[in-house]
Amino acid sequence: MRIFILGVDGYIGNALAQRLLEHGHIVTGFDNFWRRKWIENEMESISAFPIPSMETKEINFKKIGDFSFIELDVVKQDTLFEQMVKDYKPDAIYNLAHNPSAPYSMKSKENAQKVIYNNMVGTNNVLWAIKKHAPNCHYITIGTVGEYDHYNNLDIEEGYFKIEYKGRKSNEMIYPRRPGSIYHVSKTGSTYLIDYLTRAWQLKCTDVMQGIIFGSYTNEIDNTKIYSRFDFDEAGGTVLNRFCVQAILGIPLTVFGEGKHKRSFLSLNDSIQALMIALYNKPEAGKVQTWNQLSEWHSMNDIALMVKNTSLELGIDIDIQHIETPRMEYTGEHYYNFITENLKSKGYIPTRTINEEIKYVINNLKIYKETLDKYKDVVIPKIKFKRV
């Protein structure tokens, strides 16, 4: 298949491109390098794993298969992108060109505007291009389980559900959202946009609600050593990334509040597995294919303990420190259960556990300790979600 990847230079895009090429697909990657720029310039940080330039990646990707790269901003250069869709008629488009950071979106009004504009207008531009020039193209994108209310005391269904209320049974509707940051608001808005335009234009769309992605391993990356970026600053780095780097640097693992609040997780390798399953399971036109894309969920205390125990096996003794949460979140015990049957029914089987990935990451990051030490201040959260 001919496939477009928007955000090919990113964490998931880099790994996905290598898997698609190994499967023999023709891949065109797009990126405007915003992730590189805001991590370096605004967060004053780097990727823990050194990442090559896109020029170097392109050379190496072409050794794997049929790959080309175009530097393009799908928000600002939508006319050029439309022309690319018209010319190449891709079989599938992966839209990974979203800013994925809740803290970044809460840093300032300007940041909030950038995230909302990029994520929602980008989604809109891609769907219009598909409608006009490639109506049979399969649109695949990553939502986030952060769109849901983690504390609603109900099982979280997969995208759509029906309810009975005051004696009446509803038609199918989107499962309620209650986003936890401006970033999550932008993703929720994109979810409703995808749902509406899929129905209006009979598009073929897959929107996966994905948990926190962790780790750096895929079969392809282990062979090529073309690592996906591994951010660890307070805005770009997920909790596991920050904890692993904190462990290497001897900084206590900073758990928010009581640390009893739960979140869901998925390894990078399994995220790519799931996105490949999406490619090979094209939905019918007119209804969004949705699933909850995650393998396991744990409390933050559990995650910190996993990093601590695995680090100890590798000769690193690290403390756990509870700090006031900078976010608008409850950190006590709560009911937390996701329905995950749709992906399993299509053959998904988890391949990497959190403990396996922690060991892989720490072993591979040890050699960069001296460089990482120069950036140790960026792993401590300072961005406040609450009114101060």
Image (cartoon, rainbow, N blue to C red):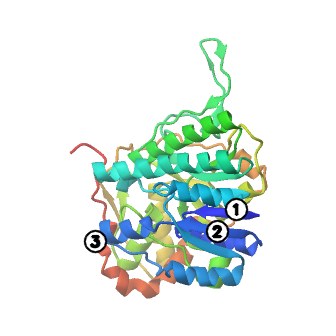
Q: Where the C terminus falls, by quadrant?
A: top left
N-terminal of the pair, mark 3 or mark 1, is: 1
Residue 15 pos. (x, y %) = 61, 71
Few, some or many C-alpha atoms within 10 Å of disc 3 (few <14, some 14-19, many ≥20)?
some
List the residue tagged with mark 3: 377
Q: What amino acid is found at the position of numbered circle 2 in the picture?
A: Thr
Q: CA distance from mark 2 to mark 3?
A: 37 Å
Residue 108 pos. (x, y %) = 28, 51
N-terminal of the pair, mark 1 or mark 2, is: 2
Q: Residue at x 74, y 57 (%)?
A: 91
Q: CA distance from mark 3 to mark 1?
A: 46 Å
List the residue tagged with mark 1: 88
Q: Where the N terminus falls, by quadrant?
A: bottom right
Residue 215: quarter of image: bottom right
Q: What amino acid is found at the position of numbered circle 3 in the picture?
A: Asp
Looking at the picture, does residue 275 appear above or below residue 61? Answer: above
Residue found at the far left of this picture: 388
Tags 1 and 2 touching, CB below 8 Å? yes
List the residue tagged with mark 2: 28
Decide if residue 9 is in sight here: yes
As drawn, is 38 to the left or to the right of 167?
left
Q: Secondary structure at mark 3?
A: helix
Few, some or many C-alpha atoms within 10 Å of disc 1 (few <14, some 14-19, many ≥20)?
some
- Residue depth check, mark 2 versus mark 3: number of the one nearer the observer: 2
Q: CA distance from mark 1 to mark 2?
A: 10 Å
State the residue in front, 12 or 26: 26
N-terminal of the pair, mark 2 or mark 3, is: 2
Q: Secondary structure at mark 2?
A: strand
